[in-house]
Image (cartoon, coloured by chain):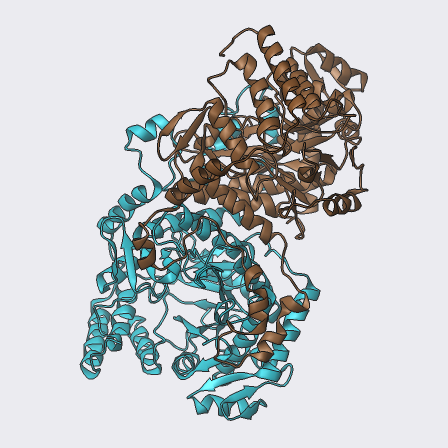
Chain colours: A brown, B cyan
Amino acid sequence: MSEPTGRRSGGRAGRQGHRAASVVAREPFLTRRLKPIELVSDEGLAILEYNADTILEEVGVEIRDYPSAVERFAAAGALVDGTRVRFPRGLARQLVSTAPSQYVQHARNPEHSVQVGGNATVFAPNYGSPFVHDLDRGRRYATLEDFQNFVKLTYSSTHLHHSGGTVCEPVDVPVSKRHLDMVYSHLKYSDKPFMGSVTAGSRAADSVELARIGFGGDLQDRTVMTSLINASSPLVWDATMLAAAEEYARANQACIITPFILAGAMAPATSAGVAAQTLAEALAGMAFTQLVRPGAPVVFGSFASSMSMQTGAPTFGTPEPALVLYAVAALARRLNVPFRSGGSLTASKIPDAQAAYESIATLIPTLMAGVNFVLHTAGWLEGGLSIGYEKFILDEDQAGMMATFTKGLDLSENGQALSAIRENTPGNHFLGTSHTLANFETAFHTSSVADNNSYEQWSEEGGLDAAQRANAIWKKRLAQYEPPPLDDAVDAEMLDFVARRKAELPDEFA
Amino acid sequence: MSEPTGRRSGGRAGRQGHRAASVVAREPFLTRRLKPIELVSDEGLAILEYNADTILEEVGVEIRDYPSAVERFAAAGALVDGTRVRFPRGLARQLVSTAPSQYVQHARNPEHSVQVGGNATVFAPNYGSPFVHDLDRGRRYATLEDFQNFVKLTYSSTHLHHSGGTVCEPVDVPVSKRHLDMVYSHLKYSDKPFMGSVTAGSRAADSVELARIGFGGDLQDRTVMTSLINASSPLVWDATMLAAAEEYARANQACIITPFILAGAMAPATSAGVAAQTLAEALAGMAFTQLVRPGAPVVFGSFASSMSMQTGAPTFGTPEPALVLYAVAALARRLNVPFRSGGSLTASKIPDAQAAYESIATLIPTLMAGVNFVLHTAGWLEGGLSIGYEKFILDEDQAGMMATFTKGLDLSENGQALSAIRENTPGNHFLGTSHTLANFETAFHTSSVADNNSYEQWSEEGGLDAAQRANAIWKKRLAQYEPPPLDDAVDAEMLDFVARRKAELPDEFA
């Protein structure tokens, strides 16, 4: 389990071994029993693949300010013209073939280690927001305290499996140093798996070093971070992201290679065009990680939004991104690599009905399409500019719904319940049957936020809306938070490292 | 087109002919290009069918206070023991085999006629709520004015195809007479298809008579109503519903035969148990319509809710009802009859995030499972006890999303958009490419309620939540409402009929 489990093997046995070792009640990751839904025919997917190859062959990708990557591609058979790299048809796909179909990302607490790929889905929270929102204080810049609060809320979450990365931007800490506080916070306040910094190669290296200390001094090439590498769509890979990806791949740490596309702006305005371009960009990025270290774990990522025709603003929870998600998930399966997409996305500024409609209209396709790694599962507001405390609680609750749904229909003898129907008499309720009594506690998924009471009772209890109830929940969770065990010597060594690096680095806020 | 289009024939050609005749911009019903999603294996579905047959054979159904129905079943080969009717294995299915696989429900305006069955989905609004809710006046008993308002809002809706039935209960009108006002309102304030009364056989007869006048004096056995016949689960059919069903079937009007199940109370607490019992109850009810008139249009309905483990209250938008929906939709397809289920269901009392999460978590499975007739598409609140004006606007908007989604991925040459990618240069945006300019207006579905603006602009415009924006929309729509054309003589004849029947009927409020 300390290595990628290889192509087409090891997953099931590995997972079973993994889960047998766990003593926690919650599952370390979601295991889907429902097969991924295929909305695009094999013929349609083959067209998208052919188009991606055409894009890579005719247009190619631009590699900005990173000559060593150009050289790696050239050595592998790509055609280089300055910073433009073109791939003979099939080359990029061939380079990606060394990537594992799934891997284990180890957590500081082995019971929280996750499988990335196969029929596993890993839920991670929001990523990258400079602002936070809550009902009490409204919208404001995020701080390190907010960051740590969300790490704590994710740690105490039954439904989130992964601590995420830049859950929000701690803008009160210099840009040049905040990666240290973020990685330390993930290691200190949680023992779930997490993501490293990608804003510079040196920060990725710091992340690896800090993780090494946090994991007890030696990673032995175990994968303990899965970090987010975004393309500069259309068809550009820049030096910052490539340097971070190189650092992680070299250390056998996982990268999520993600074309980040606002359709109509960074790609054509049509979904099939977005899907083909996404595949082309991801193939180039994934190929790069495999050139750095064949077999390094890598995830095919896709982030696609649609656009308001009135204003050009990004829109979420709309039909077109859902169609792209289903198509690209299928393309990732055909490549036999893990897939990241989806989440609980919305353009709403507050945790209102718009936020909920749009978020769940993204999260359901995420699960139905068989996404393996879900960033932005909880908290996302305002097109990602803000993370909401109440939104976090509401989304997390929906993630729990998905976990139950993807178990599928129970067709066991107990599930079929013929005995109950035989025992009962027409016209009489089933509340007292032995079958109902035996099943009642586990029969139905229960939301921790929804109010299902009568109007009268709900009114008597203050007539609160869902966001107001969520407000009470996150405050209680933070008040009750207790940190996971952490060896004092390890903590001291991490703090030393952070202090030393902070002393070495200049203060930069942009 | 004036008759059910028969089993496995006529659908596509009939629909194309129908649509060619239409000059309205909006589609009269939604045509799904995506195939229904199968979440249960053929083997699993066969188990559920076997169990339904076992239930019908061993337990049977109770026919309350309606001896003629018992006699019809006995004559068809069922085994009768008092009011209990048991079906030898396969009998009920055989009786249902005369039902059409799809039919056309004619609207007063032929351009609004809908196909029920096949790859068509028909959206109808909320049904049956005694209360209404809006942001200005809160929750209160519904009136005839509310009823008419919702008929007007549905008439002016781009996304709802069907006027529905008891959109809300006009409790200011005596129970004994309100069916007349409701059917008249559907015919007067809308020209979309609608539902008749089912609260008594005589009221069904009144509905048929009023429709006959409204359609110009002669229905010629055309189906112009699709009405809701609920079972008294578990396994009971009562005289009121059977009398209404008999009245409609005899006149070749469609019935939706719907087991209405709160799992754990009216059925076992497990989803496979709910599905098998639903099939058993629906088979008995559908068989009854076919005994009354072989070939009468009938829809297999399913309404299934889960339950709060704390309070026993019904819960919506949870995983279990979604699983039941997918299973029963597949069972209906195997029976080759149209299917009704789903909608925008929620236990929330107000149009908040809970309402939105739960509603769309019901509506997405509704479309993915291939439901043909969707009651409660818009407005439902509080487990059906209330219809919300703002909720109506919000839900209707989501129905529009579904219509776009179910068109699937466009893989035409324009959809593939290779020309755009070839025309563009890596790193440059696509906003000015000829492909984007040619596609921009139609490329992305646009919500009529969502706010996608920046936080600053949204704040400047009042920082409204989605419900507050919906509040302005329904008021504007009602203010701008104009009734469809209606022949004065026909209107006068309908009013005469309503007045005469009201004079004949006693005032009853319960």
- Give percent across and percent down for residue A471: 40, 40
Q: Name the foreground residue: A251 vs B495.
A: A251
Corner quadrant of residue A408: bottom right
- Give percent across and percent down for residue A288: 73, 22
Give me the residue at 37% from left, 62% from top: B384
Is residue A269 something one can see in this rendering? no
Q: Name the foreground residue: A131 vs B2.
A: A131
* Figure quadrant of the N terminus of chain A: top right
Corner quadrant of residue B119: bottom right
Corner quadrant of residue B387: bottom left
Position above or below: B293 against B464: below
Task: State left or right for residue A29 relative to residue B303.
Answer: right
Task: State left or right for residue A380 relative to residue B410.
Answer: left
Position above or below: A83 against B510: above
Q: Name the foreground residue: B265 vs B357.
A: B265
Q: Name the foreground residue: A486 vs B307.
A: A486
What is the number of callouts on the image? Answer: 0
Give me the residue at 67% from left, 22% from top: A490
Is residue B134 something one can see in this rendering? yes
- Give percent across and percent down for residue A61: 66, 20
